Image (cartoon, grey):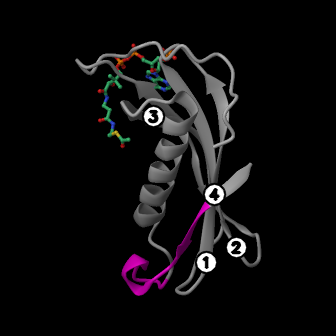
């Protein structure tokens, strides 16, 4: 898995316990996974359809630099399934893993549209 995106945890990102808020972390992961899926399919008309189990392995604290990585799990007809990991850049300790995020390619009417990709060639 290649870690492409980095962020610094700031005060506004924290929950009451002083850790990175889970909802914020998931928003970062969803955005990174969507950009990754866009690049793989060469399509911008993708929506998030489903997310599988999410594992919050360890907290991130203010000032931590985190990085997010994605990889393709499978290609469907209209869908692409991606897994994601967020880890601490300094320690490499895993913070969150998401087993599967499913994106669906849509037509102009918002209906699933075959993306025609059968093989991952793009390392973006
Ligand atoms: C980037 C963002 O954040 S977007 C914002 C949040 N997301 C949204 O607003 C999406 C809202 N949802 C929708 O508009 C609709 O559910 C749609 C258009 C995405 C899909 O409509 P559906 O009628 O469910 O589609 P359909 O049953 O034909 O399935 C489409 C594909 O999704 C897959 N799929 C559907 N449901 C699931 C599920 N629960 N889990 C995994 N895959 C699923 C199907 O297997 C199919 O894949 P394939 O074509 O590769 O075989």
Q: Would residue 35 appear left or right of 4 to someone viewing this image?
A: left
Can you give x and y, in whole percent of width and height, for residue 123 in the image?
69, 40
The image's mark for residue 89 is: 2
Residue at left 53%, top 28%? 41
How many residues crowd around disc 3 within 10 Å: few (fewer than 14), some, or many (20 or more)?
few
The residue that disc 1 covers is 65
In what quadrant does ligand 1 lie? top left
- Of tags 1 and 3, the one toward the viewer is 1
Which range is magenta? Answer: 5-18
State the SS at label 2.
loop
The residue that disc 4 covers is 4
User: Does the magenta segment cover residue 16?
Assistant: yes
Can you give x and y, in whole percent of width and height, for residue 69 in the image?
65, 54
Q: Would residue 8 appear left or right of 96 to someone viewing this image?
A: left
Can you give x and y, in whole percent of width and height, for residue 13 in the image?
41, 76
The residue that disc 3 covers is 50
């Amino acid at each position: 898995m290649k870690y492409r995106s980095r962020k610094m945890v700031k005060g506004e990102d924290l929950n009451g316990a002083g850790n990175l808020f889970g909802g914020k972390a998931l928003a970062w992961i969803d955005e990174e996974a969507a950009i990754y899926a866009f690049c793989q399919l060469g399509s911008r008309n993708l929506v998030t359809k489903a997310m599988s189990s999410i594992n919050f392995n360890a907290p991130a604290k203010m000032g931590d630099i985190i990085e997010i990585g994605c990889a393709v799990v499978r290609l469907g007809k209209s869908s692409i399934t991606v897994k994601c990991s967020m880890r601490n850049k300094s320690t490499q300790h895993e913070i969150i893993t998401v087993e599967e995020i499913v994106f669906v390619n849509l037509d102009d009417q918002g209906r699933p549209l075959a993306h025609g990709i059968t093989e991952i060639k793009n390392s973006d």
